[in-house]
Amino acid sequence: MALGVPMIKIFLCDLTHINGETLSSNVFPLGAGLLGAYLLASDLGKKVEVELFKYPHDLNERLMKGDIPNVIGFANYSWSLEISKSFARSIKASFPSIVTVFGGPNYGLSEDELRAFWGDVGFCVDFNVVLEGEVAFHTLISALIENDFDVGLVRANYQRLKNVHFLTKEGLIHKSELAERIDIESLPSPYLDTDLMDKFFDGKLIPLTHSTRGCPFKCTFCSEGAEYYNKVKQRSDRVYDEYRYIAERSVKVGMYDLMLSDANYGMFKEDAVRSESLAQVQKELGYPKNVYVSTGKNQKERVLGAVKKLNGAIQLSASLQSTDPQVLRNIDRSNISIEVLSASAHEALDNDVVSYTELILGLPGETQETHINSILDVIRAGFVNVRIYQLILLPQTELNTHHTRRRYEIQTRFRPMPRSFGHYNILGENVLVSESEEIVIQTNTLPYEDYVFCRKAGLMIDVMHNGFVFRECQRLLGAFGVPWDEFIDYALGKLRDNRLPPTLELRLTEFIELMEVKLFKSRQDLIDLMAEADAQEKMLSLTSNELAVFKAKILTNDFRELNDFVYESLAEFVSITGVSLSRELIGCVSKASLAMKDRFLSDFSEVSHEFRLSTTDWERFFVAVECSPTADFSMASDVTVALSFSHSASQVAETKRLLALYGETIDGFSRIVMRSPILEPKFRKLMGTRVISSEPLLKSLPAHQALVS
């Protein structure tokens, strides 16, 4: 611009809630970065200054210092709508000339959704950008500059606007024409082409990038199921450079995670090339160690090929939602066969790739029986983790329409969104903010009492199956050809028949009580709660993730009771099915399981026990605990051995690092266990052996190094 002409200042905010060290959204503000990078690379690049904000206190400090932008944009996600509205209201009250713009997927497209949104925010939001935003936001900024930021004039001459909604002075919702889809290959990189993202390499936030946009599937529960996004756009240019740029800055701050926003990673042929680029960076810099991304739902061989290149950093995912054909038809979804998925899951495990699947409780047509069958189907297929979510009614989805609600007699409740809560100073005013979501708790095929049972079953799956918590039990049954899912089905039957031990029954009861106290009949009820004198204390408890909290409680405080339940159930199960597993062997494996896992996050002392088994059972014991015996048992009928279990120095160091990051509380434990796809690496290992006696004689017993594979 000409000398002396001030630059136009634009703030783009993708805010996260903060409670202590807990962030509701701990990823880089990629969407805002893409908008900013596009502006800076355009004809407006020499006219504008762009800055991104993630932390609420940073934004507030800048505003309080009088650093006032011409335009401020807020990303509207389900976990940030209320905090964005709180800032927008305060900004409009104090600085009415600032143009406020919202944009993001948490914005409906039906008339009812639009009226609800604008009825709530109309006075504090000048424009809302819908669907893809880079070109639309650039066009809006150009129009604002040309009209000296007079919102009325821009609205009056709306013909040039695309993908923009606003409220007219008559209170009507104006919707501009939709723009053509963007070729994302042409978009500038917010990492490589600007310095917008550099300040977020702080060791707390996970870098986020993308290489595809859109999804070929039409699921009625997902905003990307809309026809607008059905054609998938790709980018491959400079992905190695971007990965390398991110890696170099991440390792300096001790961050080894990466998040990809792609909806079907690995499903497209271009993903193989992108995986090679990321694998090359991984080889050069040791980054990333963990990649969080949803892998493709089809082309499983291609997906597995892309995933295998990353040395276990990516989990193979299959988001099935349900395996029931009628339920899938109800949500316009088609899954590939469970047999194909099973082959992929087992091949993934053979290549040290962890697999997981996602199911949703409460889908139209789902029953207690079909939901439990879906759980057993995916366990039978070999998925290491089964993530079970509640059905959330999201804006821009077919499920969130009056027609669908009436057809399936959907009943819902509103709950505070986990971790999406905070107490903030916004322009001198103390504000308590909580995000909420609407979840399905009952349909015409799933009564509420069945919903409650399914939630209990989900917690049981999390503590018994996910992350190989009882892998030695799986191996023991596998040695006899008994499917693991049959035993899980037996254990869930004990839940159904109210035959759980008192401690586990109490935990499940407390779990449901916490779930229910967080359910509100309306959003207004939640808002009313926040007006109470002790609101902050109440909200701290209501915004916890009840599944994570009770998984952590059971695994860290009540593991002895859980372990007893699993192995007592195993003894019952084999007696019913006729499997020739001796009670002595089950007892010894149970004892070893307890020694390895009891208080594994808080007690780093050595645990030793004596074990006595027959020769045949010793061989089976070694299979179960994955040891490789080389001793000659041929002359011995019984052997008593003292085994000691302890954490290695590296295990202790890693666990203490996580505890320092998340805290030595149940909430801290919950984040550790939920973020660990496999818990085995955190358990004690067999570190020592000593022969007590043998009958009549044991030729030799190897040192620990010979015993442990």
Image (cartoon, helix red, strand yellow):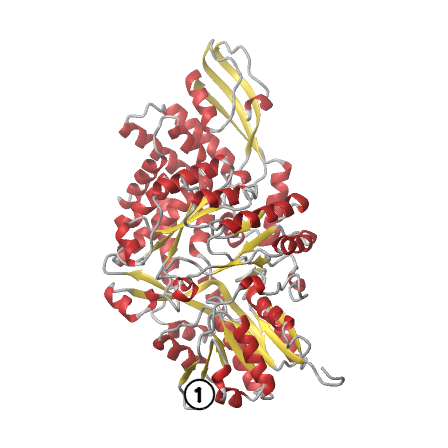
Disc 1 crowd rating (10 Å Cα; few below 14, some 14-19, many 20+) is some
In this view, the residue in front, 121 or 33, is 33
| Amino acid marked by disc 1 | Thr
In this view, the residue in front, 342 or 534, is 342
Residue visible at 33% across and 42% down in the picture:
376
Residue 534 visible in the current orientation: no
Q: In this view, does 99 lie to the left or right of 177?
A: right
Residue 124 position within the rendered picture, expressed as x and y whole percent measured from the top left: 50, 83
Which residue is disc 1 drawn over?
Answer: 168
Q: In this view, does 13 lie above or below 669?
A: below
Residue 645 visible in the current orientation: yes
Q: Is residue 416 left or right of residue 151?
A: left
Residue 514 position within the rendered picture, expressed as x and y whole percent measured from the top left: 39, 58
Report the label total.
Answer: 1
Residue 67 position within the rendered picture, expressed as x and y whole percent measured from the top left: 67, 80
Q: Quadrant of residue 150?
A: bottom right
Locate the N terminus and report the quarter of the image it occupies.
Answer: bottom right
Q: In which quarter of the image is residue 178?
A: bottom left
Q: Is residue 486 above or below residue 263?
A: above
Locate the C terminus and report the quarter of the image it occupies.
Answer: top right
Residue visible at 35% across and 77% down in the picture:
111
Q: Is residue 87 left or right of residue 544?
A: right
